[in-house]
Image (cartoon, rainbow, N blue to C red):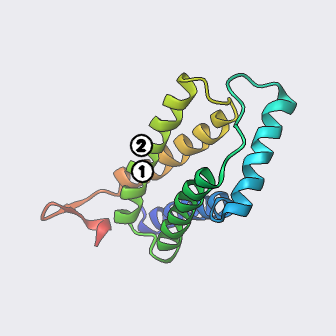
Amino acid sequence: MNASLLRRVVFASALYDFVVTVPFATPWTADAVLSSIRSLHHALGLGGDPLPAFTSTHLFFVALFGTIVTLWSVVRLVQPTAFNGAIDTVGRALFSSWMAWALTQGATRVLVVFLVLELAWMFAQGGVILGARRWRGGIPATAR
């Protein structure tokens, strides 16, 4: 497995996260995105509960998490290492779990799009990391 491929995949997944999460990084832009998701849910007549109108407290938490994920994506854009990619892959597995749980609880089916993309990046990134794994003293060589 080529270390350059690994770095490109980790970088690409970070770029995807950056583009998707920047709009959630402020209460004002997050509100606009959530309103768009709500409108999409209604326009397509999707199953599940539409997003409710968010209060300032909801928007605070959305923006908090949007900011953290945006900053994490910047870390991976600057340092697209196997270590950062591995941590991100675990995070994607957890995010996917929470999305699947929300869908089973009746969340809007718009989440399916986010879930599919999250799983795609998890498998793409995890696959190249596992393929590049060469152990030296218990540490993957690509993590150095």
Q: Is residue 40 left or right of residue 34?
A: right
Question: What's the mark number on residue 91?
Answer: 1
Q: Which amino acid does label 1 sit on?
A: Gly
The answer to whether residue 11 of the structure is visible from this angle is: no
**Residue at (49%, 29%) from the top-left corner?**
101
**Between 22 and 15, the one nearer to me in the picture:** 22
Asked if residue 25 is positioned above or below residue 114 in the image, the reply reads below
**Between 60 and 24, the one nearer to me in the picture:** 60
**Residue at (55%, 65%) from the top-left corner?**
67
Element assignment for label 1: helix
Quarter-wise, where is residue 14 in the image?
bottom right
Q: Which amino acid does label 2 sit on?
A: Leu
Element assignment for label 2: helix
Percent position (x, y) of residue 9?
52, 60
Quickly name the residue at label 2.
94
Q: Are marks 1 and 2 in contact (CB under 8 Å)?
A: yes
